[in-house]
Image: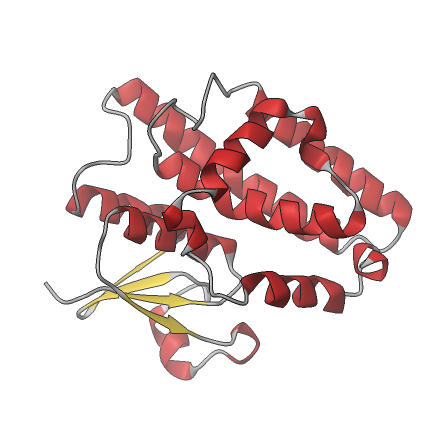
Amino acid sequence: MSKPELISFELCPFVQRSVITLLEKDQEFDITYIDLANKPEWFLNISPSGKVPVLRIGDSVVFESAVINEYLDETTPPSLHPNDPLKKAVNRAWIEFSSQLNMDMFHWLRAEDKAQMEEKQSGMMSHLKQVEDQLGEGPFFNGETFRLVDAAYAPYFMRLELIADKVEAHCLESLPKCLAWHTAMKEKESVIKSVIPTFKENFLDYVAANSGYISKSM
């Protein structure tokens, strides 16, 4: 089988999920970065939605991060899902929920004024509280073992911490389990190495360049 190629945008949290999974699997892979503001024609020809990530294996293409990660999990043992079918289904459901938090952050960063920003932050906090209520003793979602569900949330928490430090919106202070979970995940080598060396600077520049209320506080 040919080495998989992950097609990526440097700041995309969904791409980062798949990079974490590839690193956890100790899977060799190539990564190709594109400019989402100027998508190359060859990329549009293989990505039906025009979104990243896309995983290319030979002549075959897989898109959507959750599907990519499921493929990687099935083809490269050991599995990063719980063995129990019900626990596995619960994990998959909460992986899907993580996409809601990424959308919450997207809208929060683009809120036009303070009132709208506080409204979007409140909605995001409500969703984070739902996650908090699902967590056990940790350090990860299912306990001692890092799973696909952890890979799904690590990019969101990484970005939330960077923004919180800049605008003093310390969202996790009231959510001790989420904070402990984030602390455990960000110390994982696969998470640390899942972003480019200049990720922090690039991400904060990206946020500051937005026209939203939060960018004015940075």
Q: Nearer the viewer, residue 15 or 66?
A: 15
Residue at point 57%, 40% (across, down): 100
Q: Decide if residue 113 is on the left or right side of residue 151.
A: right
**Which image quarter: residue 104?**
top right
Residue 40: give x, y in percent of width and height.
44, 82
Residue at point 59%, 31% (across, down): 179
Q: As drawn, which residue projects farthest toward the left?
A: 1
Residue 11: give x, y in percent of width and height.
53, 62
**Which image quarter: residue 88?**
top left
Vertical side of 45 occupied by 184: above or below: above
Counting the numbered discs, the total is 0
Q: Is residue 52 visible?
A: yes
Vertical side of 165 occupied by 28: above or below: below
Image quarter where the N terminus lies is: bottom left
Image quarter where the C terminus lies is: bottom right
Q: Nearer the viewer, residue 8 or 39?
A: 8
Q: Decide if residue 175 is on the left or right side of residue 118.
A: left
**Which image quarter: residue 55?**
bottom left
Q: Decide if residue 153 is on the left or right side of residue 151.
A: right
Q: Is residue 97 visible?
A: no
How is this picture coloured? Answer: secondary structure
Residue 53: give x, y in percent of width and height.
40, 61
Q: Nearer the viewer, residue 18 or 40?
A: 18
Residue 2: give x, y in percent of width and height.
13, 67
Q: Decide if residue 155 is on the left or right side of residue 57.
A: right
Residue at point 64%, 45% (across, down): 161
